Image (cartoon, grey):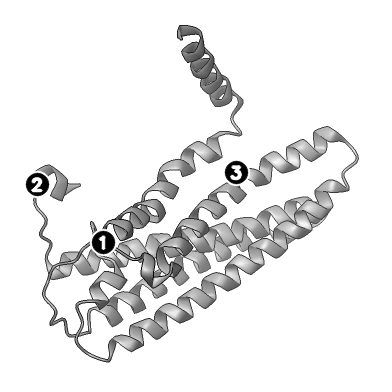
Amino acid sequence: MANSLWDTRTISSSGCASQLFFFFFFMSAEYFLLTVMAYDRYVAICKPLHYGTLLGSRACVHMAAAAWGSGFLTALLHTANTFSLPLCQGNAIYQFFCEIPQILKLSCSHSYLREVGLLVVSVCLGFGCFVFIVVSYVQIFRAVLRIPSEQGRHKAFSTCLPHLAVVSLLVSTAVFAYLKPPFLSSPSLDLVTAVLYSVVPPAVNPFIYSMRNQQLKDAVWKVITGCFQKH
């Protein structure tokens, strides 16, 4: 935001490291929290009588602390490892923020393979969380479909769908950004995909979660019908 206001494209090495750390920290913590939220919905729908026991205030504090702590550790490892590499291919990053793949392109040392290995470990950890979320939702949907009343099924789905939408948006954009085939890589496409996974999910999260609010639904519907009436 400061670069946009001051029309500058420069950033210090420490500023770049800070930006990379906070980006990884918040993205990782959000993903781990989404995994915890999947477990929360699983217990609430599949084991409602045990909810107070399994997810008391102390358990919630421990899971939130684990999510933030894991995000902090992940960000610290990636930042320290990335900025320990010698960079001899210039100092121009072809991205609108400091991103690990773009920084690795500036390295002239084979030690960048350490960071690649760390990224692989992070991907495996992220895949494990994704599998946990998918298994949780399989159990949730099986339980919801057994609910006899339509109102009960609607309430359960309305609880899960916003969370599922956020997970799908975050995972799909991040996978496309980092796992797309090399022949699709270009500076302009890398820029677009970076916007997709770093800007779009946080921007639409409040809107997705607020769709359970009836007053917001009524306001959106009023705006839409008003636009159609004008035309």
SS class, disc 3: helix
Q: Would residue 21 be seen by someone viewing this image from the given angle? A: yes
Rounded to the nearest angstrom, the CA distance separating label 1 from label 3 is 33 Å
Rounded to the nearest angstrom, the CA distance separating label 2 from label 3 is 37 Å
User: Mark 1 against mark 3, which lies toward the viewer?
Assistant: 1
Rounded to the nearest angstrom, the CA distance separating label 2 from label 1 is 20 Å
Q: Which residue matches tag 3? A: 162
- Neighbor class of circle 3 (other Cα within 10 Å; few <14, some 14-19, many 20+) is some
**Which tag, 1 or 3, sits closer to the chain's start?**
3
State the residue at coordinates (68%, 39%).
158
Q: Which residue matches tag 2? A: 7
- Neighbor class of circle 1 (other Cα within 10 Å; few <14, some 14-19, many 20+) is few
Q: Residue furthest top?
A: 230
- Foreground of the two, 227 or 30: 227
User: Mark 2 against mark 1, which lies toward the viewer?
Assistant: 1
The amino acid pointed to by label 2 is Asp
Q: Quadrant of residue 127?
A: bottom right
- Neighbor class of circle 2 (other Cα within 10 Å; few <14, some 14-19, many 20+) is few
Residue 93: image x %, image y %? Answer: 19, 66
SS class, disc 2: loop
Res 167 label: none
Q: Which residue matches tag 1? A: 187
Q: Would residue 52 be seen by someone viewing this image from the given angle? A: no
Question: Is residue 196 left or right of 96 when viewed as pictured?
Answer: right
Question: Is residue 135 left or right of 103 when viewed as pictured?
Answer: right
State the residue at coordinates (61%, 34%).
212
